[in-house]
Every structure is written in structure tokens, then in C-alpha cells.
Amino acid sequence: MNKKQLTLIALLCAIAAVLAALMLWRQPAAPASEGHDSHADSHGHDDRHAQTNAAPEQASEDGAIAMSAAQIKANGIAVDTARPAMLQERLHLPAQVHANAERTVALAAPAPGIVQSVPVSVGSVVRRGQALAVIHSPAVAQWRADYAGARQRLLLARTTHEREKSLWEQGISARQDLDAADSALKEAGIAAEAARQRLAALGIALGIDAAGVSSAVTLRAPLDGVVIDKPAVAGQAADESKPLMTVADLSQVWVEAAVPADSLGQVATGMPARVSAGGVAGPRETEGRVAFVGPVLGEATRMATARIVLPNPDRTLRPGMLATVDLMGPAREAPVTVASDAIQTVHEHKVVFVRSAAGFRMQDVTTGRSDGRRTEIVAGLAAGTPYAAAGSFLLKADLGKQDAEHED
């Protein structure tokens, strides 16, 4: 055996020794105590990871928010107690101010003609009998002429009747002549009265003087009020179908509220109403009562109209102004109520955050009547239970953060 062969044998032995050492190092260590030759217990369960995979500490209760008394105070969360209260149910509705239609008059020409002058404009305050427009109409001239002719025939018939009566009393004329004169007098009287009433019904003055029959007719204000519309201008043609202006008495207005169909059962005539309307000097609140509830729903809105009639002596309520109406139902006692701001909606459930030893706990509730300040709790909360009355939205936000962290 030469030197080269000896070197090769020594190298192979060294490699074998290294491999044996590696195999011994990777072999699992022997059990620390006797009687545990395997990791399976009597039931065949492996307990090697019983310690490392132990269940973590149980998570906090769902809907619970840990918060110390100092944190509650720092966050401005006010704690109150659920208690009985008198509730006057309130229905909050959008509304609009309208002119009182029963005190609004649209004026048109009594007959076809031409507008000569219009001495008023929109917004003008007018008095009953004040001239608003002058119109020249041939038809009016003809009606005045008809009345004048009827008056003359009446005077002639009266004279004839008196003469025939005198002759009959003297035995000169026959009775039938007196009867004919009496009939003619009555017919002339009827014709003259009909002509007069036609002019009076259209507000046309007789317009008959020494100069003859006039074709001019003056439109006059039928009531004290304000001109709220005036399409008429001098020189335009006018007739009975086209209003020349509209006058409204704004010392009293209508406030009409839109009532949803599902709330109509809560609305009745005579119930108290609180109207709030914005103005230049800020919102104005006025007390009134429901005077009318519409019997039909609007085709587009599917809502009915509740009308409140309000005095408006200073004219601060203007037609077209937006308003809100709070309809107040009868006051009744509710056994359990909370502040309305305390109620939050979480996952489409109404909840109240109840005070607990660790902070607060979310509690599902069923609500009933409300007056805007306090809300009845029908189920889910007992009287005397402390809860977060103000600042509950902060607790809802904290709860949302917890849910987000669990999802991550």
C-alpha cells in the first residue's frame, strides 16, 4: 500500500466521522422523565403544544367600551338615568308660506278693451276702492248706453201709467188701457234694473253725464292688501280671461305643511302647531292650530296638506317663504324615557350605551313616542338605568374602531 492510498483512506474516515456527528446532533433529545416515551396521552392526544398554544385571555364582551371615570369626564360624556316623563309627541314637517286664498283677488278687465294706465306696481300697498287700472272698452260704452236707454223707457212708461190711471179714474179711458200701461211700466222697470245690475256686477260705474256715455272703466281694489302680481302694462289688450293683477290681504297667511301618508293618522284639525319660518331678523316661531287637512294625496309627492292659518299684521311672513311645522300631539306619560341624543343606530339597530363598571355597554332598545328632547323606550331598558345621555356618538365611534381592528 503506497502513500497515496493511505491518504485516500484517511480522508474517507474523516468524512464518515463528520456525517456521524451530524446525525447525532439532529436527533431529538430524550424525554426529561421516565414513563413518557411518547407525547401521546392515554387518549392518544398530542400534548407537546399544550402550553404554547393555550387559548389567549378571553376577549372583552361584545359592545363593551372600557373607559375610566376620568376619561368619561374628559370626553364630555354626560351620564343620566332612564326615567318616566310626560311626552307630547311631535311631528316635524317641511312647510311653505302662502297667501290666504280666501283673501286673494285676481282682477281682470270686465270686457274686452285696451289698458290705458296702471298706477300701481308689485308690492304696492292699496286700500279698498283705490284705483288700480283704467281700461277703455267699447263693450262697456254699449252697456252704459243700454242702461241709459232702459232708464229713459222706464221714465216714459211711468208717465204713461200715471196718465192712464188718471183717465180711468175719471171714467174717460177703458180699464184695459190702464192694464196695458201697468204692464209696460213693469217691463221697463225690469229692463232698467237688469242693465243696472250688469254694470254693478262687473264693478262698472254708470259713467253717464252731460258729456255722454264713457267707454273708460276703472278697476278698483276690492280689499285692503298688497299687489302681489301685475302682468298688466299700459297699451296691452285686455279681456275677461286674462288677470291684470292680483291683490292679497297679507295680514293673515296660510302655512301649508306636507304630511307623509304614513303620518296622516297623527294629524287632525284643531291640534296645536308650532311654525318656524326664517326671515331677515332670524327665525320666527308662531303658535297656531291645524285648520284643514287635505282629503287627497298629491300625485307626485304622495303627501297630504295640513294648513295652519296665522295672523301676520307686520307682514313678516311672506308668501313663498320656507318654514317648518311641528305638530304637537296630546301629552301622555311614558314609564321609561331617555334623552333623544342618547339613541344611536349601530348595524341598523337602535342602541343606548348603558353605564357599566368598566365603562359603557351597548344595549339594543325599542323606541316609541318622542317630543324631540326625550324618547320613550318601549323595550330593552328599565327605569333607573344609568346611560350616556350626551356624547354617545363618541362611544359609537369607539365601537366602530374596535370592529375595524377585529376585522384586520
Image (spheres, grey):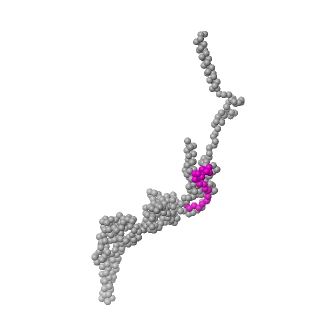
Please name whichever residue, 321 or 113, is drawn nearer the observer in this view of the structure. Answer: 321
Q: Based on the displayed image, in which of its 4 quarters is residue 164 positioned?
A: bottom left
Whether residue 372 can be seen here? yes
Tell me the quarter of the image containing the N terminus.
top right
Farthest bottom residue?
170
Q: Is residue 71 magenta?
A: yes
What segment carries the magenta color? 68-89
Farthest top residue?
1
Tell me the quarter of the image containing the C terminus.
top right
Answer with left or right where residue 246 lies relative to residue 263: left
Q: Based on the displayed image, in which of its 4 quarters is residue 99 positioned?
A: bottom left
Image coordinates for residue 172, horizontal then vertical, percent: 30, 88
Determine the residue positioned at 55% across, 44% down.
Answer: 404
Whether residue 106 can be seen here? no
Instruction: Give the answer, above or below, for where 121 lies relative to 383.
Output: below
Image coordinates for residue 208, horizontal then vertical, percent: 31, 76
Farthest right residue?
34
Instruction: Give the answer, above or below, for where 176 lies relative to 289.
Output: below
Mark count: 0
Image coordinates for residue 28, horizontal then vertical, percent: 65, 27
Q: Is residue 23 magenta?
A: no
